[in-house]
Image (cartoon, grey):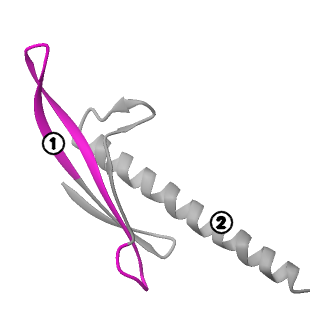
Amino acid sequence: MKRTYQYRGHTLHVSVETVCHTRKGVAALDHVALLLISSDETMPYASLRIDRVAGRPFASEAEALMGGYGVGRSIVDKLIDNGERVMATIAHSAI
């Protein structure tokens, strides 16, 4: 499962990888979100593998997809907000 989202001038590519393994002799599936973040002006600059959010593994492909999207949005928000603070500090010190 793959999705592409636009968020605050960035592109979030989220895909889901499903891994089969055994737990205590029973087959189980784990879902992992693969996140690639890029800006409209640059090549991709972040690539992450997310296997859990809030300390729990993803129970389904849909949950992994939305978890990856949520983490991507959080990263973009922090990048933009930090950049705006730095620019405000530079502008204030120039006065």
Q: Nearer the viewer, residue 15 or 44?
A: 44
Q: Which residue is mark 1?
A: 18
Residue tagged by mark 2? Answer: 82
Residue 94 higher or lower than 27, as above or below: below
Indicate whether 31 appears above or below 71. above
Q: Considering only vertical position in the picture, is 94 above or below 49? A: below
Instruction: Say whether residue 36 is magenta.
Output: yes
Query: In this image, 60 relative to 92: left or right?
Result: left
Residue type at the position of mark 2: Asn
Residue at (40% x, 83% y) in the render: 42
Secondary structure of the residue carrying tag 2 is: helix
Q: Residue at x 80, y 74 (%)?
A: 89
Q: Amino acid at mark 1?
A: Thr
Residue situated furthest top in the rendering: 24
Q: Position of residue 9 (x, y in %)?
A: 48, 76
- Which residue: 45% across, 34% down? 54
Residue range highlighted in magenta: 16-44
Dominant secondary structure (helix, strand or loop) of the stretch shown in magenta: strand
> What is the total number of numbered labels drawn onto the structure image?
2
**Residue 8 or residue 19, whichever sits in front:** 19
Residue 56 counted in the magenta span: no
Residue 40 percent location from the top left of the image: 42, 82
Q: Nearer the viewer, residue 24 or 15?
A: 24
